[in-house]
């Protein structure tokens, strides 16, 4: 390749979004921020929505800036977002209503009702997906239960990144990795499980064609070209689920490692060639999500830095606007391993006041109640690290082989305390980086689609050549962490009672 190619990646998370240019010279990749913007749910009445049109406005603004700074002829555009959420289009291709945020309270009752109609075991045997109340299956069933006019009038169902790809390209398709987060994709056949949807009264006419990660959808629509100043840039369905893109950027060799995509959620798992679906994985509620290049992401969703993010928001509302470095420093100064919570407890899914929820959890489980900000933050981070240990042990059990190294990618790698706690709690070497793993994976899949990179292994070699990594070794004091882990198991079990 004689010239450096420029790819534009849009990476949208639950807390923020970004447009990033990737400069690829055939061997190394360099990132350049174009535009960053906030994201978050917007409550209207009793419903929590995504501000989808504002996100689209921010995306187009980033595209316009990219055209001004780098010219009209980019090598590709790709979008990735969080999973499970979706939009519905009418027969004219217009969006029906605002997409609802997965943390909306409608989903809990819908999951319970759906499992009364279709056995849990049958759903898992087909989809291999962990049961979480906000999975797309239960969101759609919530609409079906209330005989939603939106669902009745829908002609096409599109997951969030597919919606943005449609607005870019005019193509109504669903990319494989994001489709796999719905809990109605047959994990082995990689096709929609229409029989499951019919049992729940969810219309199957709305389902689009599923395409592979790295599919070129076509050129940018003329209207978007005119609005942004870009040319007929290829729109590429990357690993459209942000975790699929993040895992693509893990700078590991082979498959004898574990990964954590660290951000609002911690997605922790192993990369497999085929789904791992059996009674043991069902009992542990592990998920089999689609990865790029034919891989399967066998993983567990863990609440992640959401706990810290929501503490920060609560403290900001109370008049103290701390940044994450300041919160980390307070946590570092707090006494270690005093109180422990179960990060995935339902009380932490969408509390009005996260610090109060953490204190209440500790009180209800008979532990010292953390009072100051440092103690609360340390409790959250140490609990998260202990959850990593539990998850790692379950992965090793299910796969029948040990893991010696944990790779952590994503924005959460900037929390050096959490990285060290992860090494200490698990007793494993932790390698962190790159920070912008999701955007990097997005760009690498664009390069694969354009045949500038031949394989996933070659893409990971680009990551190793392009970005620094940092290594954390576990502390030698295993006894205190073993004791803390035993307490975590007791607390987690006790918490099932409330």
Image (cartoon, rainbow, N blue to C red):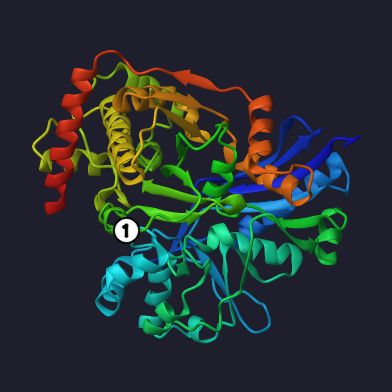
Q: Is residue 79 left or right of residue 97?
A: right
How many discs appear? 1
Pointer 1 residue: 278
Image height of 206 relative to 112, above or below: below
Residue drawn at x 39%, y 60% as measured from the top left = 129
Q: Quadrant of the N terminus?
A: top right
Q: Residue furthest front?
A: 400
**Mark 1, secondary structure of its residue:** loop
Pick the front one: 265 or 261: 261
Q: Can residue 362 be seen in this snapshot?
A: no
Image height of 483 relative to 449, above or below: above
Image height of 420 relative to 316, above or below: above
- Quadrant of the rendered image containing residue 379: top left
Q: Residue furthest top?
A: 476
Residue 367: give x, y in percent of width and height. 11, 33
Pick the front one: 60 or 431: 431
Give neighbour class at mark 1: few <14, some 14-19, many 20+ (Cα, 10 Å).
few
- Quadrant of the rendered image containing residue 161: bottom right
Q: Residue furthest right?
A: 2
Residue drawn at x 32%, y 71% as measured from the top left = 122
Residue 439: give x, y in percent of width and height. 63, 41
Pick the front one: 357 or 470: 470
Q: Can residue 470 be seen in this snapshot?
A: yes
């Amino acid at each position: 390749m004689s010239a450096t190619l420029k790819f534009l990646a849009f990476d949208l998370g639950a807390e923020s979004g970004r447009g990033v240019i990737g400069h690829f010279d055939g061997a190394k990749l360099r990132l350049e921020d174009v535009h960053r913007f906030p994201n978050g749910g917007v409550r209207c009445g009793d419903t929590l929505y995504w501000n989808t049109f504002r996100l689209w406005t921010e995306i187009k603004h980033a595209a316009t800036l990219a055209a001004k700074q780098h010219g009209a002829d980019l090598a590709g555009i790709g979008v990735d977002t969080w999973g499970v959420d979706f939009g519905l289009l009418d027969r004219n291709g217009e969006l029906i209503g605002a997409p609802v945020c997965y943390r909306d309270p409608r989903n809990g009752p819908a999951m319970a009702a759906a499992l009364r109609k279709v056995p849990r075991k049958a759903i898992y045997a087909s989809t291999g997906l962990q049961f979480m109340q906000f999975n797309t299956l239960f969101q759609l069933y919530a609409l079906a239960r209330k005989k939603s006019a939106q669902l009745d009038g829908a002609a096409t169902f599109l997951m969030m990144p597919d919606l943005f790809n449609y607005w870019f390209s005019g193509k109504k398709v669903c990319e494989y990795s994001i489709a796999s987060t719905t809990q109605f994709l047959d994990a082995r056949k990689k096709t929609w499980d229409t029989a499951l949807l019919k049992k729940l009264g969810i219309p199957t006419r709305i389902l689009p064609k599923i395409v592979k990660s790295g599919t070129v959808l076509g050129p940018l629509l003329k209207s978007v070209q005119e609005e942004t100043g870009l040319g007929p840039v290829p729109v590429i369905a990357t690993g459209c689920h942000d975790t699929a893109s993040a895992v693509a950027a893990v700078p590991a060799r082979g498959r004898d490692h574990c990964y954590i995509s660290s951000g609002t959620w911690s997605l922790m798992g192993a990369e497999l060639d085929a789904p791992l679906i059996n009674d043991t994985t069902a009992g542990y509620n592990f998920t089999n999500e689609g990865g790029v290049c034919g891989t399967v992401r066998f993983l567990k969703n863990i609440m992640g830095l959401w706990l810290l993010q929501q503490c920060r928001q609560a403290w900001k509302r109370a008049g103290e606007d701390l940044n994450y470095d300041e919160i980390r420093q307070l946590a570092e100064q707090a006494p270690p391993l005093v109180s422990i919570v179960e990060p995935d407890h339902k009380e932490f899914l969408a509390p009005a006041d996260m610090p109060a929820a953490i204190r209440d959890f500790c009180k209800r489980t008979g532990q010292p109640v953390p009072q100051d900000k440092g103690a609360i933050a340390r409790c959250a981070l140490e609990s998260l690290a202990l959850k990593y240990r539990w998850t790692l042990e379950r992965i090793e059990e299910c796969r029948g082989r040990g893991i010696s190294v944990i790779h952590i990618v994503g924005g959460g790698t900037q929390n050096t305390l959490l990285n060290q706690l992860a090494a200490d709690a698990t007793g494993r070497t932790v390698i962190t980086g790159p920070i912008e793993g999701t955007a990097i994976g997005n760009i690498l899949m664009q390069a694969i689609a354009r045949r500038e990179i031949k394989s996933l292994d070659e893409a990971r070699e680009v990551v190793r050549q392009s970005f620094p990594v940092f290594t954390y070794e576990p502390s030698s004091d295993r006894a205190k962490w073993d004791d803390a882990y035993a307490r975590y198991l007791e607390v987690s079990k006790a918490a099932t009672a409330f």
